[in-house]
Image (cartoon, rainbow, N blue to C red):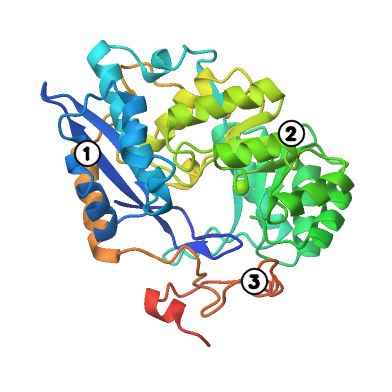
Amino acid sequence: MTVPIEAPLRHSNGAHWGRFVRTIIELETDEGLVGLGEMGGGGESAAAAFAGLRPYLLGHDPFDLEALRFKICNPTASLYNNRTQLHAAIEFACLDLVGKRLGVPVYQLLGGRLRAEVPFASYLFFRHPNPSTGEGEVRTPDQLVALARTLKKRHGFTTHKLKGGVYPPEYEAECFEALAAAFPEDRVRYDPNAVLSVEAAIRFGRRIERLRNDYFEDPTWGLNGMRQVRDRVAMPMATNTVVVNFEQLAQNVQHPAVDVILLDTTFWGGIRACVKAAAVCETFQLGVAVHSSGELGIQLATMLHLGAVLPNLSFAADAHYHHLVDDVVQGGKLEYCNGCISVPSAPGLGIELDPDRMARYAELYRELGGYPYDRDPGRPGWYPLVPNQDWADPTVGGPVALINQDSALENR
Ligand SMILES: [Mg+2]
């Protein structure tokens, strides 16, 4: 599926080129029930990867979720064939099936709901203008604050996350300070996707540490880098890059580098893995939040059911969802109210696919194909080092030709 977003979103590695590409799976039982799953990316390789797992799934009881985990991605076989993200999509579909079979929402299968709605952050990006309308650019502090005001008015957000790592750190610090100043009652958080050097991260962190920060998210790469920043900056550290499995979580418990773990239902291999990880975090009193890797309604539902059952979720969740112009689920996009989205209460994940929308966005994928997430259409040939030393120029704006994939990959 390809679903358009309002404007191309820039990040430290490249950009989302004006659309999200996702793969939707449907698992059917012998009783005729259908369970839904979703994974990032798409195309022939994703379809082939799921088709390759057919023999593993034929005859497997969707209730047998622990058996499924070891069947598809036991830790030593995963050294040769990492299927964590495929497993996640299949687990979503199995939980959807189990819920539908029992007539209960997924949160009932996970220990029961502690909240009826999940709060979300505004998740602001620097953006190229929409190539069709010329609207939607975010490059200057004024444009950033204007977008945050629009989103706050539309959806009620009271937490603002800036995805940085695009422009020079001093410039992004100015943008972030403008954001914090514009919403003195709200919470803020900054995430440059791990591209700052340890030294630059410390400088940045010290500059912003007096603001109403939830945390400092992945300012630099690696557990050791994060630990050095943590030692020198008076702010909790958060990650969705260096603690994304249980092995790394154990390391982080023994040698703390990060205070808040952003759980991602895809990266961790399913909703249940995230619930287990949250329990480890609860035990050791680490914070948890909900990560977004771009989602349509199915994945969003997994994030809502997860958010509903975590006792220690004390931060607004992340979602790219409000950047989408539509969704593939019946009724279109789920709505925000006062910055929150209600947890679906129908059986299973609680959402259903809309066949017309599915057909439309499958066709759009066939028309446009994929896009390289790690390339920016505004900077052909560029790729970042880690730490990055070649930032985008904040004085250069305006429309960007959405060049084709091949020209984005050419070296210049
Ligand atoms: Mg992040």
Q: Would residue 322 appear left or right of 84 to someone viewing this image?
A: right
Along the horizontal axis of the image, is 284 left or right of 317? right
In the rendered image, residue 283, in percent from the top left (x then y), is placed at: 67, 20
Q: Nearer the viewer, residue 397 or 133?
A: 397
For label 1, the SS is helix
* Nearer to the camera, 46 or 4: 46
Which residue is label 3 attached to? 385
* Lower position in the chain sequence, tag 3 or tag 2: 2
**In this rendering, is residue 16 above or below 251?**
below
Q: What amino acid is at disc 2?
A: Asp
Image point 30% across, 18% down: which residue? Answer: 99
Residue beneath disc 1: 56
> For this rendering, which residue is in front, 324 or 235?
235
Q: For the point 63% across and 48% down, which residue is it? A: 242
Q: Residues within 10 Å of mark 1 (few under 14, many from 20)?
A: few
Between disc 1 and disc 2, whose residue precedes? 1
Q: Which residue is mark 2?
A: 186
Q: Amino acid at mark 1?
A: Tyr
Distance between mark 1 and mark 2 Cα atoms: 48 Å
Q: CA distance from mark 1 to mark 3?
A: 40 Å
Q: Nearer the viewer, mark 1 or mark 2?
A: 1
Q: Residue furthest front?
A: 76
